[in-house]
Amino acid sequence: MLAGETLLIGGHRKSGTTFLHSLFDGHDELYAPPHDLHILYAFYPGWSKTELSRKEQEERLRRVTVNAWRLSYEKTLDGSERFNVLQSYIDSNIANVDLSKSGEVVNLIISALWSTVPSGVKILVVKETSTEIHVPWLLGDRPGWKFLHLVRDPRDNYSALAAGQKIYYEKLGDDALDTLTSTIMRYKLGIQAISWNKKWFGEQRYRVLRFEDLVNEPTKVMKDVASWLGVAWANSLVTPSRNGEPFLGNSYDGKQFSGVSAENVGKWKERISLNEAAVLEHILSEEKKANGYEKTLNENYSAKCAAEWYGQMNFKYFFSDPF
């Protein structure tokens, strides 16, 4: 049973969704658990397959949720108690859930999180990247939900990912081509989802924010968000925090930010190669234009760079040698 209104934050990874989520932490009418959901990429669809045993499915779901979240809760005085309530709810209800169905898994986890919210809370605020692609069934089946979609200039977005190439993504087995190709695919799908999400759910339930607007005019943007959600304005909505403690960012560069910062806006020229920027400008030209991000590079040069990317991408992922 879904206990109340839920706001889901989505957007491309490293677009600023964790930062946006942190702005909801200190508000009396909102509860923002200090973690991602992890459901629609770390559990579904890979571990929801019916050929897996029930035991394997349950172990995986617990691994990517409660087991992964435990440390986040234990950092606060009442966190251990809240975590125990969360874990107990899942243990008591998981047997009634068909783990091959993403909707039932989502309902279980959201209901478990609702069992932990403090009194007086009106809205649960959760996040998971790229969930904008899943909005039709997430919001369609849950009338008490709203969705906040954060978008960012794809060149800056990719720059934030590229900063973690050697220290994080390569350890997962992703090379630079994987990271660039993933950015193009996910970004394009995420931006294309905007038109149909707006059509089906309207401004009342689905909003798009630009990262650049959020960090350059945080009070203006967050006052609008508070009005949209129907909660009182509070200065906490422009004060990043997690578990009540200042949130200093999660940049792969290792930088710590005191409060809201626009430092990395437009810094892609210093953070990625001209070739990479040209590929993004060419392949994502329509998506950039739709969200107010202008081209800056020569179109002929960008087209040549995109063709080179295509050749490398096609050879790595799709070419089968018949000779």
Image (cartoon, rainbow, N blue to C red):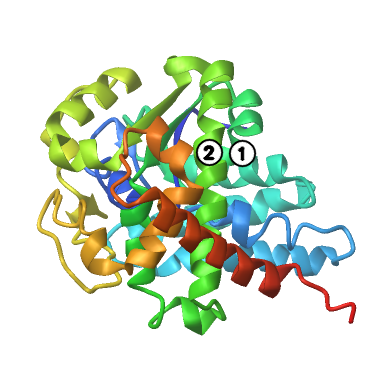
Q: Which mark is residue 134?
A: 1
**Which residue is rendered at x = 51% and y = 21% of the image?**
198
Q: Are marks 2 and 1 in contact (CB under 8 Å)?
A: yes
Residue 20 x/y as whole percent: 30, 44
- The residue located at (42%, 78%) in the rendering is 168
Can the viewer see residue 172 in this picture?
A: yes
Q: Report the amino acid beneath label 2.
A: Glu
Residue type marked 1 = His
Residue 283 lies, in percent from the top left, at 50, 49
- The 10 Å Cα crowd at callout 1, few under 14, some 14 to 19, many 20 or more, is some
Place of residue 80 in the rendered image (x, y in percent of width and height, measured from the top left) = 38, 63
Q: Quadrant of residue 174?
A: bottom right
Q: Secondary structure at mark 1?
A: helix
Q: Residue at x 27, y 45 (%)?
A: 25
Query: Which residue shows up at 67% across the image and 74% down it?
Result: 316
Quadrant position of the C terminus in the picture:
bottom right
Tell me, yes or no, if residue 123 can be seen here.
Answer: no
Work out whether residue 172 or residue 184 is closer to the camera in this orientation and state it. Answer: 184
Residue closest to the eye, 178 or 141: 178
Q: Percent from the top left, x then y, of residue 207?
A: 40, 26
Residue highlighted by disc 2: 132
> On the picture, is 54 further left or further right than 69?
right
Crowdedness near tag 2: few (<14), some (14–19) or many (≥20) residues, C-alpha within 10 Å: many
Please, is residue 49 above or below residue 193 in the view? below
Above or below, comparing residue 170 to residue 30 in the picture:
below
Secondary-structure class at tag 2: helix
Image quadrant where residue 218 sits: top left
For residue 235, side relative to residue 31 (left or right): left
Identify the mark at residue 305; answer none if there is no mark: none
Quarter of the figure with the N terminus: top right
* Observer-nearest of 17 and 314: 314
